[in-house]
Amino acid sequence: MLECSILQGDATIEARQRKLATGWPSQAILEAEGGTILSSYSTDKDRVINALSGYNKIWGNETLKIDRIGRDGIVVRDVRLTLGLQAQHCVIEELAAKGSGAARGVGFFARFLFSEPDIKFGGRPFEEAALPELDPIHKRIRELLSERLPWSDDGVGIKPRVLDLSQDGKAAWIEAYNAIQSQEGEFGEYADVRDVSSKAGENIARVAAILHVLENGNGGKISAENVRRAEAIVRWHLAEYKRFFVGVVLSQEERDAEKLERWLVAYCRKNKCTSVPHRPVDKGPGRGSKDGRKHGTDPERVFQDQLPLPPRGGGCARPGIKIPPARKSPLCEIHITAKEFAT
């Protein structure tokens, strides 16, 4: 009798594979402290590649045959594994650097939908955790979890029903795939993140299938509307990934400039203004220390085009920011579109 255990905690990829092969064939690792999983890998390139490639194969529903000295061999097939990990910025950077960048090289990150929420220190008053608008989604997920698994004929793994795209859905998917692929060239929007954008088409199909099942169950075909919704979701996460990993390779000065820009825009949103006095700018992120010395990026140097900021992802234009030279004006003038205020 198999134990129905869906949520799993920390474990090596080898232990995870064995549990999937001999236990419940559909599992999830949902970990608020993702560092306990992501930082556990060796710095040896071969070991990192071997561990992360194991997750990649499960993601692709490949059959794995594993033999270990002193243990019975196992075959992993027809299983499903979900990873939902939260980790600090430094943990992701550390994993990205291990094994000479193996996590990006083998496409491990490409299987995730990345996001990096803005840190709002000083702007997070207590709020009740209740989000009633999510109640219908939670109810629907509980309904889906209560359904019987579609077991394979031999009862070893699961064989979910294959969902097809409608004719319009397929046309929408091809359009999305070609649009993203066309931006992977040398000067394209996704030139710096080809390792992830190359899997965007597959992720769009998967997200579209999830949206379809949430709405319609396992029947029917995936509509063009759900494909376009999925494209919007995946493109947003692509922009987040680009924002994170382009930032990883920036110089410290460029990172300070990016941080200063985000602070200026946040200040204008909070205070519903388009001009910022120099005094708060001078006290902005990374602008002071206990001994009174200044550090961080000089706002005048950044916004007089002496230090160009890197391009933003997701096709978003940067806000126009102008700081008068030599403090000739008491204000830092910000030109921000309505979209910037809303996002």
Image: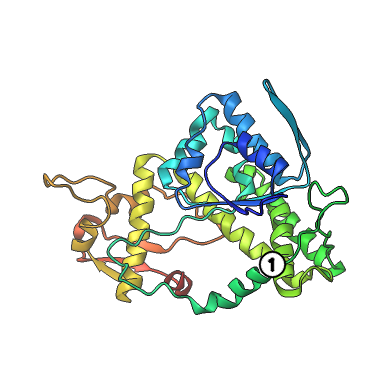
Identify the residue at horizontal 87%, vertical 67% (top origin): 167
Q: x, y percentage for residue 29?
A: 57, 50
Which residue appears at 29% of the width and 47% of the height?
297
Furthest residue toward left: 291
Residue lying at 18% horizontally and 46% vertically, measured from the top left = 294
Between 201 and 267, the one nearer to me in the picture: 201
Q: Is residue 151 left or right of residue 302?
A: right
Tell me where residue 340 sits by quadrant: bottom left
State the SS at label 1: loop
Q: Which residue is mark 1?
A: 146
Q: Is residue 190 above or below residue 283?
A: above
The tally of labels here is: 1
Query: Is 336 situated above or below 1?
Result: below
Q: Position of residue 219 (x, y in %)?
A: 83, 70
248 or 100: nearer the eye? 100
**Residue 267 seen in this snapshot:** yes
- Of residues 65 and 73, the one nearer the viewer is 73
Residue at 29% x, 74% y is 271
Residue farthest toward the front in the current orientation of the protein: 1
Residue 66 appears in the rendering: no
Name the residue type under label 1.
Answer: Ser
Of residues 197 and 1, the one drawn nearer to the viewer in this rendering: 1
Image color mode: rainbow
Q: Is residue 329 above or below residue 88?
A: below
Left or right of 129 in this view: 315: right
Crowding near the residue tagged with mark 1, few <14, some 14–19, many ≥20 C-alpha atoms within 10 Å: few
Q: Position of residue 211 (x, y in %)?
A: 70, 68
Q: How far from the left and from the top, in percent, is residue 125?
A: 30, 71
Quadrant of residue 138 within the rendered picture: bottom right
